[in-house]
Amino acid sequence: MKADDMFDSLLEEPQKPSGPVTCLGMTFENDEARRAHFTEELRKKLQDPEFRKIEGFPIGSDEDILALSDPPYYTACPNPWIADFIAEWDAQKPEQPEGHHYHREPFAADVSEGKNDPIYNAHSYHTKVPHKAIMRYILHYTKPGDIVFDGFCGTGMTGVAAQMCGDREVVMSLGYQVKPNGTILQEETDENGKKFWRPFSKLGARKAVLNDLSPIATFIANNYSSAYTSSSFRYIASKFINNLKDKWNWLYETKHIDNKSTGEINYVVWSDVFLCPDCSAELVFMDVAFDKSEGKVCDSFRCHTCNALLNKKMMSHATETYFDALLKKPVSRNKQVPALINYSLKGKRFEKKPDSEDLTLLVKIEKNLAELSIDPIPMMHKGGENWGAIWRSGYHYGITHAHHFYTSRNYLILYDAWITAPTKELKWAISAILNYINKKQSFTGGGGGMPGVLYIASMVQEKNFIDVLERKIKSLDKVLPELSKIKSRNICGTQSTGALSKAIKDETLDYVFVDPPFGANIMYSEGSFLWESQLSVWTNQSPEAIESTYQEKKIDDYRNLMTGCFSELYRILKPGRWMTVEFSNTQSSVWNSIQTALADAGFVVANVSSLDKKQGGFKAVTTPTAVKQDLVISAYKPNGGFEERFKKEAQTEEGVWDFVRTHLKYLPVTKQQGALLQFVPERDPRILFDQMIAYYVRKGYPVPISSQEFQIGLAQRFMERDGMYFLPDQVAEYDRKKMTSGELKQMTLFVSDEASAIQWLRQLIKEKPQTFSDINPHFMQQLGGWSKNEAQLDLRELLNQNFLCYDGKGPVPEQIHAYLSTNWKELRNLPKDDLTLVAKARDRWYVPDPNKAGDLEKLREKALLKEFEEYKEVKKKLKVFRLEAVRAGFKKAWQERDYAVIVAVADKIPNNVLEEDPKLLMWYDQAVTRMGGE
């Protein structure tokens, strides 16, 4: 590489900005003086033993924490200035007019935001949500100057999104219009089908407070919002790269095949060596298994010694003992050898087998490494074997310390580059390439290796460190003009979100967006260990909200940790405000744990959508176990007025209707997929009943109304449309939208138990009243996914307990009459007692009106409780049972304060059933809590 390759035009060093700066009401000569003052204040804090006891305080020395921090904006430990910033920001907000009332519906629109954004790709992480997707939520729920919080901030995309809400060009790139006065408009359709632009937000940056348990996360997040100029970065980075080339280019020199010229190594392929199971010959994996013409590993291949037909699973690793230059002792490891060198000479690429000079260079590198004074870092501070949940006995044999994840060549230059990097921005760039220059980088895999794990492939691509860093700096140089649009700093701290009491006061935040941990999906602290080993500050695993057998954290521990975090978010969020939870997991038990944690914290879920990250579209979720895609949960904190009223009304029926009335205000009036209007599950009477029950139970009150009374009261007090309930002003809006969108698109339902079977039948029969013989074949086709623990009911029993059948006596019911007259011309305009109409309608099942539905519900509940009595008497574990009976029994036991019955029957149910059913889990958790308090 030539010294002037990096940037075409490089002038003299730009002058550093000078002049006074103001921070938290104090004025300093310049930014360095500000940093020096607050660094000393933080140093004093770090000497306070109580400060270090804050939950989630990271692992690291005072000096390493101080070196990483940029106080008061960012601290690599709990940030003691967050409350001061929030108070300052609140004081800057304009006064609201008298009578101002905040109200937003949950965000339920389709979104399409891909990941191919330069800002998004500037630094990798385990999981990320594109900042432009988050912007849509922030614009919907907040106004300029509002304070947004993300307690699981990762790389800080929420902070970027909050700031970008003040950039006209970026906001317009989302498909919105922006007026000269800053009003933001979105396109909608009126009742006549015409497009129009409706104002919904205002242009202006929002303030962001970010927190994460992980030091690498907050380090990345802070750098996204640091105020530095593109020109200064370009100059410093160019000088730094040139210095690296002058000092370390010899690491990547190799003789050309003519044995005269010297080329520059682009990468070296290191190959595992395996043993032939037949003749014990050592086989270099790349030589025997890699098809160069196809660019892939062969499923089977021949031993070059005995010609045995082999595959990778048949062989064991060859091992070797070598002298570890950093550990200063002989150690064993899986044997890897350099099998291929790809290099450049005069603009052309060549490949060759390593020669004797290449091998001599490796010996020289080891000697250089041995001369350095480096303290080896044991993996997860433990070292040895089995150092973590993602440790694997095969490819991690001999991998006991952080430096074992690097070749000696790249570790040598990485060490030097890190300690000589003159700015945090350059260290940010180096951290961004770690997974590309260590052994996670597979020769045949994608860039950066497999996310979330520390997998080492059988063919590792050792890339040229300087080349990779130079390319990263060039890409960052293109990103900086975008990041320069961020005009103010986000505030960032490093601790557990479950313990924010010393950082943030009650009810001070305007909106929360979080993308929390996903159960056992990702071992964050382990996956971040190599990054954090560069920082010398590591995640404190104790409050890490994950499932991990290694950390002895089960699903209950995960749920309790998430409840603690959500409880803190509930405490600091203003009443009547919203939290958006982006969540991804393929296990329903984890999804239900999140729902339970939200409800236990006090939040009420108003909307659940799913995010297909491939397509970027939000689609309605129809079942509690539909978790194959990322879920987006909209939850609100009930406003203070309702909470106060509820304390007085809880024992009366009026408390029920006050809750329903308040809850309906927070629900989306409509959901659309393209031009089609969708069913809003949250407005379904059964889901409304479940939400009401959950609220009462978690507040510790008996429910003063039965299911059948709820159904009747709902119909009397609220407006019904298409099986959904609305407030009077909402129903008018729904009717207008339906006029322009046409027919309602019903949910796609999957039958797995009694509840979903009833819902499926309700949808089928409501759309088309039909006879048993018509229904039965369709019903039988739905039973393939029936839960193994759920007692399978006869279709007749389900119909008799939940629906009505017209027996030909009396007038034809309105639902059947409407269906027949719509679909048969000859049956139109006939009186409801016409014999022809009666004959066509006889034996058809239909959905009862609310009054008769209440009677049916009463009979059904009686049958369910009878079965529950049998479960109480059973001495052994229940393998197959009627889940609806258990739910009904738990509800009755709760009303009677018989918590022991709930716990006793729960102990007979398989754990997975309890964990995957949010209703049962709620009754059980609350019963255990009550028993503990009595």
Image: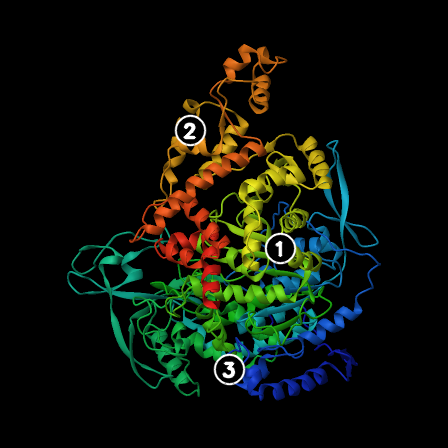
Q: Is residue 1 visible?
A: no
**Real-space Cα separation, disc 2 to disc 3, in angstroms:** 63 Å
Q: Residue at x 49, y 48 (%)?
A: 624
Name the residue tied to disc 1: 650
Name the residue tied to disc 2: 778
Amino acid at the residue labelled 2: His
Disc 1 to disc 2: CB gap under 8 Å: no
Q: Is residue 532 visible?
A: yes
* Snapshot quadrant of residue 766: top right
Q: Who is closer to the viewer here, 616 or 320?
A: 616
**Real-space Cα separation, disc 1 to disc 2, in angstroms:** 44 Å
Task: Identify the colour scheme used.
Answer: rainbow
**Would you place residue 442 above or below residue 652 in this image?**
below
| Left or right: 433 as drawn, with respect to 300 | right
Q: Nearer the viewer, mark 3 or mark 1?
A: 1
Q: Residue at x 52, y 55 (%)?
A: 595
Q: Who is closer to the viewer here, 335 or 287?
A: 335
